[in-house]
Image (tube, rainbow, N blue to C red):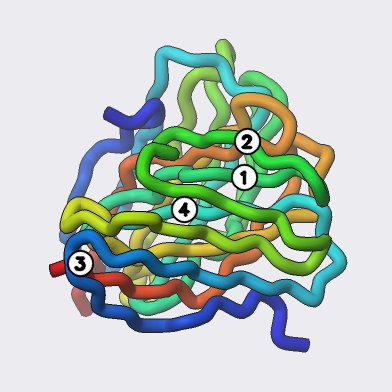
Amino acid sequence: NAGVTQTPKFQVLKTGQSMTLQCAQDMNHNSMYWYRQDPGMGLRLIYYSASEGTTDKGEVPNGYNVSRLNKREFSLRLESAAPSQTSVYFCATARGWTNTGELFFGEGSRLTVL
Amino acid sequence: TQLLEQSPQFLSIQEGENLTVYCNSSSVFSSLQWYRQEPGEGPVLLVTVVTGGEVKKLKRLTFQFGDARKDSSLHITAAQPGDTGLYLCAGFLHTDKLIFGTGTRLQVFP
């Protein structure tokens, strides 16, 4: 089983360009998350989806949009990339509908905006 | 600013020393978790604490949840080089919404 798969793993964009980060899971989990991690820092929640068909804002949603395409897939879109969005982006999943569940993470997608 | 503040931000110690990492907030959390992250990988769960005042032990690691459920600590006894990594606390604000702390980077030298 692959677990949580993120694509692409690396991407370089110019300011103003758009792109979509893809996340797919084969764990049959209900909840999915997008976090960003800046160098030497903790993770900040961008958006999350508690179940198929629902999405909610996290701590830093500005400049991002998400789509919960189906139970397996949760995408993160940058419509007009800015240098401040240079970061490592992590997708995570959890069984969901609980406040004690374990999150399982992908390997991360490293994005550089020039 | 992040809702969960960790201290210290960096910790560099010799093998065999003890250490404590703190995770503090002004908000109440329904539960709190600790994760460890290795370079180039996603975080991995170490423990979940749910009840105020709860103490959990995982070999040489001891985790405590504050009585008011606003803070937590991680104590490592006799640290080893294999404990090196980024330690992250994380709290559920409500069902499904998990936010992370600012992180503590630990380096243990042989």
Whether residue B65 sits left or right of residue A13 in the image: it is: right
Give the residue at mark 2.
A56
Give the residue at mark 4.
A35
Q: Where does the image place residue B10, in percent across and percent down from the top left?
A: 18, 52
Name the residue rendered at 65%, 74% in the picture: A4
Earlier sequence position, callout 3 versus callout 2: 2
Quadrant containing the C terminus of chain B is: bottom left
Name the residue rendered at 26%, 37% in the picture: B7
Q: Mark 2–mark 1 contact, CB under 8 Å?
A: yes
CA separation in Å, label 3 and label 2: 25 Å
Chain for numbered disc 1: A
CA separation in Å, label 4 and label 3: 17 Å
Q: Amino acid at mark 1?
A: Tyr
Give the residue at mark 3.
A113
Q: Amino acid at mark 2?
A: Asp
CA separation in Å, label 4 and label 1: 9 Å
| Disc 4 crowd, CA 10 A, few/some/many (<14, 14-19, 20+) | many
User: Dot 3 lies on which element?
Assistant: strand
CA separation in Å, label 2 and label 4: 13 Å
Give the residue at mark 1.
A48
| Quarter of image, res B30 | top right
Mark 3 against mark 1, which lies toward the viewer? 3
Asked if both marks, 2 and 4, belong to the same chain, the answer given is: yes
Give whichever of B27, A61 is nearer the camera: A61
Earlier sequence position, callout 2 versus callout 1: 1
User: Dot 2 lies on which element?
Assistant: strand
